[in-house]
Amino acid sequence: MATLVFGMNQSLDGYVDHDAFAPSPTLFRHFVEEASTQAGSIYGRRMYEIMRYWDEDHPEWNEDEHAFAVAWRRQHKWVASRTLKEVGPNASLLGPDLAGAVRAIKATHEGGIEVAGPVLARSLGELGLIDEYRIYLHPVVLGQGAPYFAGPRPPLRLLAHERIADDVIRLRYAPA
């Protein structure tokens, strides 16, 4: 059975914003390794459209960016959207029964499956489908933006913590 993992970069004040701060080269390499081992990813429409950036090579990419693109393209992507009618390569749209579709994905796959985006994570968390939360805590304060937890904070228990880069700590939690 697969494990659903919601992990994102987060500011000290609890916000996620890929435009406000970016991973260091060390942290990006960590994300390349994570993507290489994932069985797939579940996206909401907005996050999927952002990640489609990795579908085509860009001449300015470095070796790690190419490696991430290869890993991302390899894994299957499931997209929860009420508005998209089609998705790109190695991706499929989830039907209107999000809970049933995600339960079927978990039951028929092995390994970690990334949940991408706080709004989708809220929905899946409320359904009891998120197995682990990973917070990559950065030493920045944004003061506004999209919160990591898009709704009420679920009760959590700490599984582990580790320094990933010089200034980033990864906190791993499971629902309590």
Image (cartoon, helix red, strand yellow):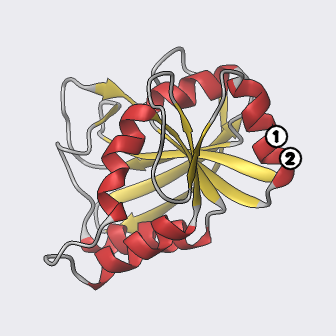
Q: Which mark is residue 16?
A: none
Distance from the alpha carbon under mark 2 to that under mark 1: 5 Å
Q: State the residue in front, 134 or 80.
A: 80
Left or right of residue 55: residue 21: left
Q: Secondary structure at mark 1?
A: helix
Q: Residue at x 50, y 21 (%)?
A: 82
Q: Residues within 10 Å of mark 1 (few under 14, many from 20)?
A: few
User: What residue is pinned by disc 1?
Assistant: 104
* Circles 2 and 1 in contact, beta carbons < 8 Å: yes
User: What residue is pinned by disc 2?
Assistant: 107
- The answer, for residue 67, to whether it is visible in the render is yes
Q: Residue at x 17, y 42 (%)?
A: 20
Q: Residues within 10 Å of mark 2 (few under 14, many from 20)?
A: few
Q: Position of residue 2 (x, y in %)?
A: 78, 53
- What's under tag 1, amino acid-wise? Ala
Left or right of residue 56: residue 97: right
Q: Secondary structure at mark 2?
A: helix
Q: State the residue in front, 135 or 42.
A: 42
Dividing the picture into quadrants, the one containing residue 58 is bottom left
Dividing the picture into quadrants, the one containing residue 168 is bottom left
- The answer, for residue 160, to whether it is visible in the render is no
Q: Position of residue 76 (x, y in %)?
A: 60, 58
Q: Position of residue 152 (x, y in %)?
A: 54, 14
Q: Residue at x 47, y 25 (%)?
A: 119
